[in-house]
Every structure is written in C-alpha cells, then in structure tokens.
Amino acid sequence: MPLDINLFRDYNGGEPEKIRDSQKRRFASVELVDEIIALDAEWRNLTGNIDKLKKERNRIQKEVATKKKAKEQCDDLIAEIGKIGISVNESEAQLKEIKINLNKKVGLVGNIVDDSVPISNDEDADNRVERTWGVPRLPTPELLNHHDLLWRIGGYEPERGVAVAGHRAYFLKDVGVMLNQAFINYGISFLRKRKYTILQPPYFMKKDVMAGVAQLEQFDEELYKVTGDGDDKYLIATSEQPICGYHKDEWMNESELPLRYCGVSTCFRKEAGKHGKDTWGIFRVHQFEKVEQFVICEGDITESQKMHEEMIAAAEEFYQSLGFPYQVINIVSGALNNAAIKKLDLECWFPGYNAYRELVSCSNCTDYQSRSMEIRSGRKKLGDTQKKYVHMLNATLCATGRAICCLLETYQEPNGVRVPEVLVPFMGGMDFLPFVRDSKLPDKVPVETVFKKASISSNNSNDKKK
C-alpha cells in the first residue's frame, strides 16, 4: 500500500519534506524517508548504468555484424559482448534486490496526515471531541451491564462457546440471534435507501491481495491464517479488505463515481495484544458480524473529504435513529493506521460502563490502497506523467455485537430490555425482551465491581479497530 515514489523525488516535483513532516506527526521513523530516497537514487543510477551497457552491447553487435559481413576477424568483440552480458545479468539481479527492498520500505511509510488531525501520540488524552448527540443515561446502582443483560434475556451461552471454540467464543441464542440479524437487516435497509450496492464478500483472501490492504503487524496481531488447499489464505478482519480488491486492476470511468458499497460479512480477529481487555460479554470477540460502508470516488482530495463527511453523517443518522447518545472524535495522528490520512470514530454511551465506547471507525485512505490494487480512473491525456488513482474510504455502519451491547445497556428496564422502535419490524414485531433467567454473577460480588473490572482501560473508550 505505498505512497507514489515520485513524492520522494524532489528533482521531479516531489515533496519529500512533506513526507518527513507527516512521519513526524505519526511519531514514526523520519529516517526511513531518507533511506528510501537513497535507495531510489541507487536504483536509478544502476538502471542508467544498465541502459548504457545495453547500448554499448548493441553498438558492438552491429560492429560484429559488419565485420562478419566483410569476413573480418572479430573474436575480441564477441568476447566483449559476452563480458557485457555477464555485467548486465549481475546488475539486473542487483537491481531486482534493490527494487524489492525499496518497495518494502515505501510500504512502511504512512499516508500524508491531514492538517485537521490532532497531533499527539496519546489517544487517551488527546483525541478531540468534534460533536456530541443525545443525553447520556446516568449510571445508577441498579443498572446492569451488557453481558449480564444478554444472559438474563436468554441471548447467549458464553461457557458453551468457550468449551467448543476457546477464549472469547460464544453461542448467540434465541433473541440474541434475532437482535444480531435485526441489526444486519436494518443496516442493509438503511444503506440501500442511500444508494449503496450490497456486497457479501468472500470471507478469506489470497495472501498477496491481503498484503495490499493490511499492514505487516496485522498479519501477526489480527489475521487468522487458513491452510489446506496448497495456497495460504487469510480470514478477513473486515469486509473493507476484500472490497478493496473488488475492482482490482480496473480502469474506472469518472462519470460512474462515486461508487457506494455496503459490505455485509462475518469478521475474524485474533485480538492479539488485547489480553485481559473486555473479556466480559460480546464487545471484543474473535468472530462477529459487521455492516460496512465503502466508497470509491474520484482521486481528488476535495471529493474524498466530502465523502468522508457524508459517511460519518450516515453513521450518525443510523445511531440517532436507534436513540444511542454518542460523540464523534477525531483520532490523534500517532494512532492512525498507515493507510488513513484522517479517522473519525463514533463512540456511543454505555450506561453500564459509565463511558463512551467505539462503535464506528470512519477513515479516508485517499489513493493509498488503490495504488496496491491498481485501480485507476479517468483517461490519460497528452502531457500527463502520472497515473491517476481513485480514492477509497471505509466506515463501520454497525458492528452487530457492539450494537447489541449498547442497546441492552441503553434500553434496560427492571424486568427486561425494550427494543428501539426502528428495530421492531426487523424483530418480527417484538418490542420487549423479558428476563427469562437469573444472573450468573457471583452472589457476593457487587455488580458495580464487575463493571469496574470489565471497563479497565476503557473509560476513555478509544479502542482501535482498524
């Protein structure tokens, strides 16, 4: 997922200082930029030398042809051609190694951070609240949290899930399944009315394609590897990943843009590095369903910024319709993934946690991913020196597990949980979910103590998902 190599070339109209400044904002390596510039210069010099050698070889070959035609001796020239050929082969092998190393290093440099992003490496302290909506329900001693509520309404079986599939596994059951499907179907209906095309992608991807949309550390910390048919594949962590490749190697007509896709999929995440965090319930799990917004637009920063605002606005409207109080936060520069120039998170209020928790992540990735997928637009005009790539953006609409958690805590009542009006048609007309069994919490452990344990490191509610 590299930046354009021409951005590193100041002699060719590039802006290497802009890249250095962006790396500083990301609290990432600035030295990496200089290493890339040096490698690129080495690659260009070696390419020039190879061209000279080939030109000299061609000259000598013509001379040999002339001498042979005149029946003159030319063994020395033929030997020289052989020597040049060896030099060319050696240089081309060296050139290939330099190119591999160069591409690898370019792929480690993040996209150019947008000027509107707060500059900090501490997201707990410095994520900026852009706006809020709704009135948070004040915590009271009798309020329960989502994992207890989901158990009481007969919505899931965590212990049986762990017995079958291990840590963070669960069975959704009865009304839990109905809530999950209701959020999926409401999300599909919501986006289809807004001219989104619905896509259900493959749930695994080829390694080379996944490498174009996922950062290196994601392979270790997030992605599950699948083997068995000879070629390694990876389970998707979000439908954004396969949809990035939906138009791979295509040249798009700008009159067709923007394209709006609604990705619907099961997602799989190892959650390595999250040990001990959110171990209760279904808020942070290895397998969950998600409805995703994905937009492809013209490769113009003004256009993609407009689409970014449109996508977060759609998410806000979705959660307003559900009655979930929320805040929109601008994520600090040091917490952005490499592809994003800016990320806005929507965090909904969880009364049981007494905190805002992330439900939506909305990122503008400009042409960072489309370069690796070779998705271009427009028609090349006379005098154009660079390819024009589309811009790509992604945003959660609804991660169903987290949405269920928020619904349960927001709409809990003494004897059960009320269903928001917009979800009732997708619940078969069911508007109330009564408690059908007692809590499984230890009798001697106060509920507020469980809240505290479950929300360690969560009060600032900045959970990175992408």
Image (spheres, rainbow, N blue to C red):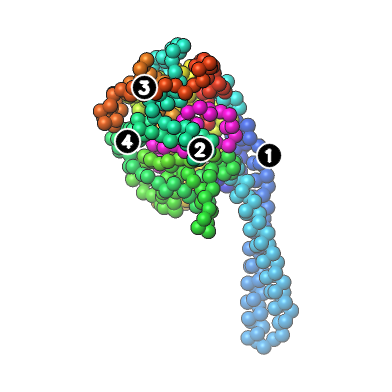
Q: Do the residues under discs 1 and 4 have CB atoms within 8 angstroms? A: no
Question: How far apart are labels 3 and 1 at the CA level?
Answer: 59 Å
- Write the residue at 60% across / 50% down: 103
Instruction: Judge from the rendering whether residue 375 lies leftward or rightward of residue 454; answer left or right.
Output: left
Helix, strand or loop at label 3? It is loop
Say which mark, if any, is on residue 435.
3
Work out how far the residue at label 1 is from the one at label 4, CA to CA, in angstroms.
Answer: 48 Å
Per the rendered image, the range of residues in magenta is 271-298
Q: Nearer the viewer, mark 2 or mark 1?
A: 2
Sequence-wise, the earlier of marks 4 and 3 is 4
Q: Residue at x 38, y 40 (%)?
A: 264
How far separated are the C-alphas under marks 4 and 2?
30 Å
Disc 2 + disc 1, Cβ < 8 Å: no
Residue at 38 percent of width and 18 percent of height: 412
Magenta segment: does it hold 289? yes
Residue, far bottom:
71
Q: Is residue 97 above or below residue 178?
A: below
Circles 4 and 3 in contact, beta carbons < 8 Å: no
Residue beneath disc 1:
31
Q: Which residue in the structure is indicated by mark 2?
A: 163
State the residue in front, 274 or 164.
164
Say what secondary structure mark 1 lies in. Answer: helix
The kind of residue tagged 1 is Glu
Determine contact: label 3, label 1, CB under 8 Å: no
Residue behind mark 4: 185
Decide which of tag 4 and tag 2 comes sooner along the chain: 2
Callout 4 touching callout 2 (CB < 8 Å): no
The location of residue 127, given as percent across then percent down, is: 53, 23
Residue 330 vs 47, above or below: the answer is: above
Q: Secondary structure at mark 2?
A: helix
